[in-house]
Amino acid sequence: MRVVVVGATGNTGTALMHALAKEPGVTSVVGLARRLPDPNVPPYDRAEWVSVDIGEPDPGTAEEAALLAKLEAVMAGADAVVHLAWRLQPARARDQMRPTNVDGTRRVAAAAAAAGVPHLVVACSVGGYAPVDDDVPRDESWPTSGMETSEYSVDKVDQERLLDEVERAHPQLRVARVRPALIFQERAGSSIARYFLGHAVPVGLLRYGRLPFLPLPAGLRLQAVHADDVADLYTRILLQRATGAFNAAADDVLTAPVLARVLDHGRLVELPPRLVRGALAAAWHAWLVPMSPGWIDMGMGVPVMDTTRARTELGWRPRRTAASSLRELMRGMANADGIGGSPVLYPRGLRRERG
């Protein structure tokens, strides 16, 4: 089996490259990324590499036509394409995110269809689901209408609608969608800290027991899944040529008391969600953090996902709990050398002087 992975160097992409390297049924892997990794370092040493930015050209231009031709040539002869590329930042510059997140998905799907690829597997998200006000588990039939106050959710909803159109226009293309919870692993610690905490939060405080207490919005509950478990799900989808949507989450749910026990000896202070959102909004507008207040809305509103379909149809079982995956992530964040400056956090045209 020949597999093309778009966005092969990110959090999930790296885990998937590890999984595919160990799978005897996968004979060839092509990795696509904006910035190429060291091809001599595992797991990147088991793949061919192509540098490509799926969000770079403007729609309808000669540059976009050239990009589509390049993608089609790379995908020719592939048995499957896995699309993982997604931009979380710069959230302040929507015109820099949507070309990758939405237009990029359209380009990957169009190239896959034009190249005659039989199977397209796309990274969607729990963030695309309609909000709920209870803890009743929802399966993949729950509406993907998202939350208008979250930029991430808006893009994920548009991605879902685009895939609906792809399925109607190209019935010969088998499409699968993976809707994971938060994806954690130790290797992603520094990048997640950079994306969501920025410079304002000393990462040393994330070491266990350093916080005097843990302030969280009342009623918060989160699901998470380890990157290796998500990679295992992608691999099963590829090998079994599965279609449709699949939820992905560990068995346990991270409630506020559980989060406090995992992160800081259980010293929890629950605050009204509106107060937490207001504080985050103030920090966001003051350019203290790169995480917008829409993440609070999404975190409080997304449903608890039912993962029965992946378990019964694909035999998937998460090997790690959400709590252990969170501990691993926090270890990776706390042990990072430092966040440092990043053009991701301060995009072109929006960089501010910092004194």
Image (cartoon, grey):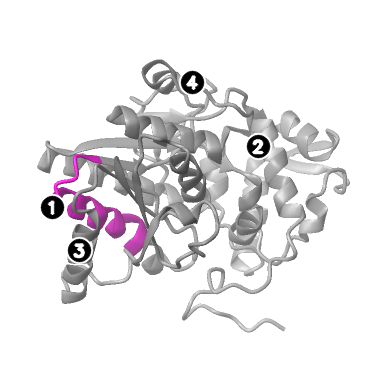
Q: Earlier in the sequence, mark 3 or mark 4?
A: 3
CB of mark 4 within 8 Å of CB of mark 2?
Answer: no
Disc nearest the viewer among 4 and 1: 1
Q: Does the magenta run of residues contain 102? A: yes
CB of mark 3 within 8 Å of CB of mark 1?
Answer: yes
Q: Is residue 65 left or right of residue 242?
A: left
Disc nearest the viewer among 3 and 4: 3
Residue drawn where x is 71% and y is 51% of the image: 332
Q: Disc 4 and disc 1: Cα gap in Å?
A: 38 Å
Find numbered disc 2 in the image and state the secondary structure of the residue it sits on: helix
Q: Disc 2 and disc 3: Cα gap in Å?
A: 37 Å
| Magenta region, residue range | 99-119
Q: Disc 3 and disc 1: Cα gap in Å?
A: 9 Å
Residue drawn where x is 83% and y is 39% of the image: 264
Q: Earlier in the sequence, mark 3 or mark 1?
A: 3
Kind of residue sitting beneath label 4 = Pro
Q: Earlier in the sequence, mark 2 or mark 3?
A: 3
Q: Which residue is mark 4?
A: 137
- Report x, y in % for residue 353: 63, 84
Report the magenta stretch's main SS: helix
Q: Which residue is mark 2?
A: 325
Kind of residue sitting beneath label 3 = Leu
